[in-house]
Amino acid sequence: MGFTSRIDELRSSHRPYLDSPNPEKISERFPKYLSDLNAASATSPSKHYDPCFSSLPSLVSHHPTLNLVTNVDVPLSQPLSPGHDYFSSPPQHVPVVASASSLTLNPRALDPYKSLNLPTLITGVCDLQNWKGYTEKTWEMHKLAAAFPKEKVKCGEADNGDVLRISMADFARYSTGCTDDSPLYVFDSRVLSSNSTISGGYEPPVYFQDDHWTHLSEKRRPPYKWLLMAPRQSGTTVHVDPLATSAWNTVITGSKRWVLFPPAAAKDIVKAKHMYGEAEDDEAANYFMKVLPKIMKEKRVPCYEFTQSPGETLYVPSGWWHGVLNLEAGVGVTHNFCDDFNFVDVWRDTRTGRRKSCWKWLDGMAAAGVQVGGVPVRDKVESINTADGWDREAFERKRRAAKEKKAKRKEEKKRRKAEKKKRKRVAADEDEEDEDEDKEEEEQEQRSSDEDEEKKEETAGSDDGTDESAKSQKKKKPKRGKRDKDTEKWQAKKEKDRVAVEGAVEGGVRSMSVG
């Protein structure tokens, strides 16, 4: 199978409902979007950061590519604090920009931002920690493709849930000049575990290495790290990361356009399904180019939009809505994690969402002597569960009852389906019997009709004095030869002569009688 055939097969599995790769011609509108974006960034006025960061002046600097947008016209009058109400007093500058050289390699340097659950863009991490994928440019897409041409990476999912994979060589070729409305997008977690050469091109930033998920085995813990390989105008629509985890995302090559909404923002407002046209697909490019401007115009929720450049790392705190659009083809890496600052929410989601593994996770943390906020992890979990009125045994009973109820519904559905199938089969059998009876009646009627016809023919034959066999022969009219015809002529002539003689004799007798 050639390259074109392989790509077409992946396209048809990735978005089977699309008649062609670019029915909406997004690629034709994308250059204007980029031009408008660059013009807006060039004319954006420089602004100061919020008062809550005045005590950390060395960590804060203006980011030249940042297009700072807040669409709620309420000034920030109070410093931020944990649990800050973003709707009554939205901060003017999100994300905050911090320099890795100022933060140094102190693992706790980012804690002030984490404690406020505030998105932060960190510059210089790749240089400071000497990521070979960035400093030696080994993670450029064409170099990855040349080094690992046959390495298969995940580029999407089919409608039935099957994973779609593509070789790095094919993907690099596909990304060059890609004009698809819904581009394939590599989001692969396996390769960072299976290929040490690729994973050796980076290491998690020191500010995010305190990850409590490390106390659960790789096999049991939820997926958490991904290699990103993106064509231009690919991306992800607005979402919240699973299990209340936080995330960091680093761009190695290319650039990304981000939009952020506070955790309290309503899902229907930020996703804005009602703003899509009837024929518009739910794609990142459509969202950023057409839907997001409408959301910002309504001013119903704080909204922050900015561009992330190569070498920059974005910290996305737990619960923040975010969407990404790749402005150009590029490569990046992202991790989800759990630390002291989001542990409470992560535990609440995990105890129900990962029911079996969460207790093994708790055992692993307890065995390692993990403390959350200075409190032993078991005590912390107990306090969370008590505050929520959550009881494991009660939850399990409720879950088992729900499972049994679901099983009964399934069984009842199965029984009804079987009954319906049986009724259809019985009805089909009855219809078949009726058809047989109708057919038999028709045959009987036909036989009776034939018998009546035969009787009529017999009666008509006896009235005419015609023998039945002669009549039958006459009906059949067999083909006669020349000899048969001559014989018939001779017999006809003989009969004629006989009749003439008899006529003459009879005439003579009458003459004699008269005389």
Image: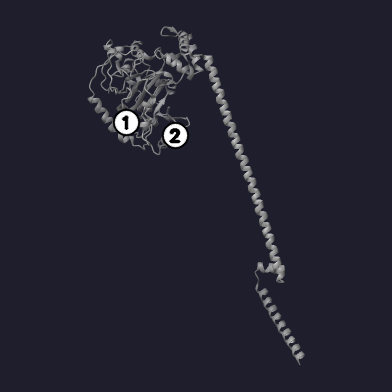
Identify the residue under disc 1: 289
Position in image of residue 417 (x %, y %):
58, 34
> How far, Cα to Cα, is label 2 from label 1?
26 Å
Q: Are marks 2 and 1 in contact (CB under 8 Å)?
A: no
Query: What label does residue 479 carry, if any?
Result: none
Q: Is residue 360 left or right of residue 341?
A: right
Which marked residue is nearer to the observer: mark 2 or mark 1?
Answer: 1
Rate crowding at label 1 as few (under 14), some (14 to 19) or many (20 or more) other CA atoms within 10 Å.
Answer: some
Q: Is residue 355 left or right of residue 296?
A: right
What amino acid is at disc 1? Answer: Met
How many marks are shown on the rendered structure?
A: 2
Position in image of residue 161 (x %, y %):
47, 29
Residue at the image position 63 percent from the left and 43 percent from the top = 429
What amino acid is at disc 2? Answer: Ser
Q: Quadrant of the C terminus?
A: bottom right
Along the line of sight, which residue is nearer the eye, 352 or 487?
352
- Picture quadrant where residue 178 is located: top left
Asked if residue 313 is positioned above or below residue 186 in the image, the reply reads: above
Residue at the image position 27 percent from the left and 19 percent from the top = 63
Q: Give the SS element for disc 1.
A: helix
Asked if residue 25 is positioned above or below residue 295 in the image, the reply reads: below
Position in image of residue 349 (x %, y %):
45, 18
Position in image of residue 128 (x %, y %):
32, 15
Q: Give the SS element for disc 2.
A: helix
- Picture quadrant where residue 19 is located: top left
Along the line of sight, which residue is nearer the eye, 215 or 297?
297
* Residue 146 seen anywhere in this rendered image of the structure: no
Query: What label does residue 13 carry, if any?
Result: 2
Along the line of sight, which residue is nearer the eye, 464 or 156?
464
Query: Sequence-wise, which precedes: disc 2 or disc 1?
Result: 2
Residue at the image position 46 percent from the left and 17 percent from the top = 350
